[in-house]
Amino acid sequence: MEIVERIKSILISPQKEWPVIESENAPHMKVFTTYVVLLAVIPALAAFVGYGLVGYTVLGVHVGSVGWGIRQAVVQYAAMLGGTYITAFVVNAFADGFGARKDFDCAFSLVAYAYTPMFVAGVFYLLPSLSWLASLAGLYGLYLLYTGLQPLMKVPADKQTLYFVVSLVATVVVSAVLSFILAAILLRGVYSGLF
């Protein structure tokens, strides 16, 4: 299975895999439909099971319902899909300022494959008490993003770190706003119905 090999390669040997990804020159819609859409199901499905069926305990009160699980799944799926696009947009938008190649398809491939650890670690949402491990996997995703900047975006070596930091800060701000909006829309009133 091709997707399994890609996951394994990008996680285990990213230095070898980035040039392979760059040579494919895949359009962003292909990467989106054949990789991101499929892998984003992992955290969404796990969040549904974890928050909807397993639940968790807060101050001795069991919290969890199918409705809560559905909302968590929708938030996870939308955040992963939207986050991939937003991060790719940010990385591509700053390309000119750092002497990098401005190419949305390359930026999207870079971000989509750098999100792989978060997609895969989304399985930890099965047990809400372990969900923080999915976020921790994001740190390895940052390493993947950093190592992929040169092969995919052709950023000069002396500007790679600054390009990474500026893109990261902008992405964190935009992602925080996206998360806030999603939570406000999808999770509104949930807490009052849980207890």
Image: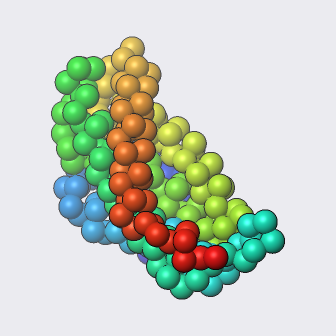
Total count of labels: 0
Foreground residue, 110 or 119?
Answer: 119
Q: Where is residue 147 in the image (x, y as percent from the top left)?
A: 46, 35
Which quadrant does the N terminus fall into? bottom left
**Residue located farthest toward the top when viewing the structure as drawn:** 158
Foreground residue, 116 or 71?
Answer: 71
Is 170 rendered above or below residue 106? above
The answer to whether one can see residue 164 in this image is no
Q: Where is residue 177 in the image (x, y as percent from the top left)?
A: 37, 45
Which quadrant does the C terminus fall into? bottom right
Foreground residue, 87 or 189?
Answer: 189
Residue at 44% across, 22% down: 161
Foreground residue, 115 or 8?
Answer: 115
Residue at 52% across, 38% down: 143
Is 100 rendered above or below residue 41? above
Q: Position of residue 113 (x, y in %)?
A: 41, 52
Residue at 51% across, 46% down: 141
Residue at 41% across, 53% down: 179
Q: Where is residue 17 in the image (x, y as percent from the top left)?
A: 44, 48
Q: How is the image coloured?
A: rainbow
Is 164 rendered above or below residue 189? above
The answer to whether one can see residue 120 in this image is yes
User: Which image quadrant for residue 165?
Assistant: top left
Tell whether 153 sits left or right of 182: left
